Amino acid sequence: MGHLTYLALLAGCLVATAPLELVLRVRVYARWRRLLLAVLPEFVVFVVWVLYAIAQGHWDYSDERTLGVRLPGGIPVEEVLFFLVVPVCAVLALEAVRKVTGWDAGYPVPPGDSPGSIAATDERGADRGAESGPGTSEADR
Amino acid sequence: MSYSVLAVLAVVGVLVVDLAVYRTRMVTRRVFWAAYAIVVVFQLLMNGVLTGLDVVTYDPDAIWGPRIAYAPVEDLLFGFAMVTLTLASWAAVNRRANTARRRGFDTDTRPSRTR
């Protein structure tokens, strides 16, 4: 695969997790504004870390296994994408576990997203979500 | 600072953010550890390919030395910090948005209080 090695790995992550949104309907991409907001702190911190690591020579990237496009600071474009793709996959995993198990993640469950509703999601039955939910959602704030 | 030192500091930092800043307490929740268990399997796979194929190479002086699936053990700390910071932020964003909505406030116009 040569120059596409790193990029293909990132694409593989997105393809592998896509069914969580498309089939399980975890509504992570659907809440894209929240997703961007949630990824932002991680993105800033870790890009700064990588820039420091490159400057200090802690690690380096192969020009044969990447596109060879380096952004300012010597960071490959794939590495920047990594800090967007991987957190999105992590959020998809969290929401998938939460949806399947109904375990509390510390924030109120959006309407129509209670664990018992998985089978009924196709119904889209108006605003009945208010009284459902796992019952633990507002317990710890 | 070496990669090793930074990796340890990052883990401490995200624990502080999760427990004391956001107070999302993700690391105390089953749902977090179940998700992390899934993520770490894929991390070992992807990182194994990245380091096994020498997409990324490390300065031996910046790491402790032991490796798991080709990658320095520090990468596990790096990955944990990255995932935990992301999921705690996600929980914080959703807590605010869903709580605002439930109380009848419009999510987008509610003034944000940073803590």
Image (cartoon, rainbow, N blue to C red):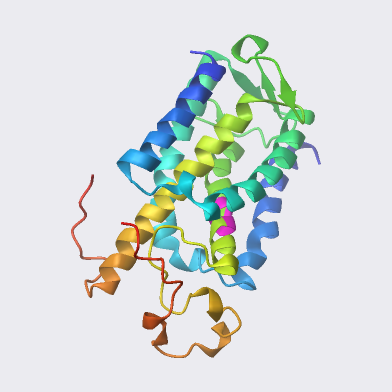
Q: How many marks?
A: 0
| Residue A73 seen anywhere in this rendered image of the structure | no
Q: Is residue B88 left or right of residue B22?
A: right
A122 relative to B95 in the view: left or right:
right
Q: Per the image, is A63 magenta?
A: no
Q: Who's the residue at 71% across and 19% down the image? A: B66
Give the residue furthest to the right. A1
| Residue range corresponding to the magenta coloring | A89-93
Displayed quadrant of residue A100: bottom right
The quadrant of the rendering that contains the C terminus of chain B is top left
Image location of residue A55, percent across then percent down: 51, 17
* The image quarter in which residue A63 lies: top right
Vertical relation: B30 (above or below) B60: below
Q: Is residue A18 above or below residue B9?
A: below
Q: Residue at 38% of width from left, 60% of height from top?
A: B94
Q: Quadrant of residue A106?
A: bottom left
In this view of the protein, which residue sits in the foreground, B107 or B40?
B40
Q: Farthest residue to the top: give it.
A: B61
Q: Residue at x 48, y 21 (%)?
A: A52
Q: Is residue A122 visible?
A: yes
Return the x and y of residue A57 as percentages of the image width and height. 57, 15
- Percent across and percent down for residue A94 are 55, 56
